[in-house]
Image (cartoon, rainbow, N blue to C red):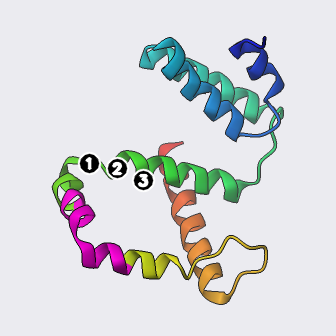
Amino acid sequence: MLTLLDLWKNSMKNLIIPTIFILSLLIVRNVQANDVAHVALDSYNKYQSGFVRVDDESKHIALLKAVVNIKINDFEYKDDIAKLRENKRFNKDVQRMTKQLTNDKYKDSKNKQIQKILEDAGRKIYNILD
């Protein structure tokens, strides 16, 4: 049976698996946030030293998603977000709009524009937080 450490050693091929490893530490071992920060920093250092190769756009998109997941619960937005989640018309509009998005290799101009906006936002956030 593989341990979490074995999984960690075998998973340095991309950036997603180390993230899952850190989350599994939180869930399985109930690790304190400070310990998780050290594990994340070690992962980042290994990433920077060349064990993991990911293009910058992917890095920026992943960071953007992580920041949005945190900031959606920000005090300023929390009540309004809760109201929007209950708003049927808003949810219907969001579904209609998101149906236009695709993750295919060949994207139309609208999807390319949105991807560029997300990459730019992720790059700006990365530069602020780094």
Q: Residue at x 29, y 47 (%)?
A: 73
56 to the left or right of 82: right
Q: CA distance from mark 2 to mark 1?
A: 5 Å
Residue 76 place in picture, x, y as percent: 19, 54
Query: Which residue has dot 3 on it?
Result: 68
- Looking at the picture, does residue 77 appear above or below residue 6? below
Part of the protein shown in magenta: 81-93
Upstream in the sequence, badge 1 or badge 3?
3
Tag 2 near tag 1, CB within 8 Å:
yes
Res 64 visible? yes
Query: Which residue has dot 1 on it?
Result: 74
Secondary element type, mark 2: helix
Residue 48 place in picture, x, y as percent: 74, 35
Mark seen at residue 71: 2
Say whether residue 89 is magenta: yes
Tag 3 near tag 2, CB within 8 Å:
yes
Q: CA distance from mark 1 to mark 3?
A: 10 Å
Which amino acid lies under the numbered mark 1 shown in the image of this protein?
Asp
